[in-house]
Image (spheres, rainbow, N blue to C red):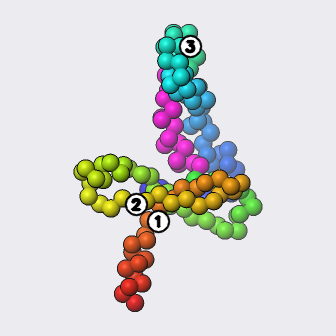
C-alpha cells in the first residue's frame, strides 16, 4: 500500500519523469515481441528497442500517477491510499483462502472507467450491525 497527499501542481517534478526514460522503447519492444517476434529478435531492431521490459516501469507508474491531480481540485486537499493487487483470483481459490475483493468501477473524467476495490466495506458493515 502506498499513502500520500495528492499533488496538484509541479507534476513533472513530483512524477519523477527521469524514472520513465525509455518507456516508449519498452512499449514498442512489447508490441514487436507480440506481433513480430522474428523482427524483434533481429540485432539491429533489438538494439533500437533496448533491453528494458515494459513491466519494469510499473513501480514508477504506481508511485506517481495515482497521486497527480488537476489544480482545479486543489481545494479537496486529498490524501490517497493506493493498494496494489498482490493476489490473483486463481491463487485465492487454490492457495490463499482469504476472500477475494471484487473490482468495482466508477466513471472518471471524460467518461473513462476508474477501477477500485472497497477496502473497508466489511468493517463498515460490522460497525453498523453493532450499533
Give the side of residue 47 with respect to residue 11, left or right: left
Labels 3 and 2: the sequence-earlier one: 3
Q: Give SS at disc 2.
A: loop
Q: Nearer the viewer, mark 3 or mark 2?
A: 2
Location of residue 26 (image quadrant) = top right
Measure how far apart labels 2 and 1 are at the Cα level. Answer: 7 Å
Residue 120: x %, y % from top left: 43, 69
User: Magenta: predominant secondary structure element?
Assistant: helix
Q: Which residue is mark 2?
A: 101
Q: Is residue 52 above or below residue 3?
A: above
Residue at position x 66%, y 68% in the image:
76
Residue 98 in sight from this viewpoint? yes
Of 76 and 130, nearer the camera is 130
Labels 1 and 3: the sequence-earlier one: 3
Labels 2 and 1: the sequence-earlier one: 2
Residue at position x 33%, y 62% in the image:
99
As drawn, the residue found furthest toward the top would be 43
Amino acid at each position: 500500500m502506498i499513502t500520500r497527499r495528492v499533488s496538484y501542481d509541479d507534476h513533472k517534478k513530483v512524477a519523477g519523469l527521469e524514472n520513465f526514460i525509455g518507456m516508449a522503447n519498452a512499449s514498442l519492444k512489447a508490441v514487436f515481441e507480440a506481433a513480430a517476434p522474428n523482427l524483434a529478435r533481429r540485432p539491429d531492431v533489438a538494439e533500437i528497442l533496448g533491453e528494458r521490459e515494459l513491466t519494469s516501469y510499473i513501480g514508477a507508474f504506481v508511485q506517481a500517477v495515482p497521486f497527480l491531480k488537476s489544480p482545479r481540485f486543489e481545494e479537496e486537499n486529498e490524501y490517497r491510499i493506493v493498494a496494489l493487487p498482490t493476489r490473483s483470483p486463481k491463487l485465492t481459490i487454490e492457495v490463499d483462502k482469504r476472500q477475494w475483493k471484487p473490482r468495482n468501477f466508477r466513471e472518471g473524467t471524460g467518461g473513462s472507467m476508474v477501477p477500485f476495490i472497497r477496502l473497508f466495506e466489511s468493517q463498515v458493515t460490522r460497525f453498523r450491525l453493532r450499533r
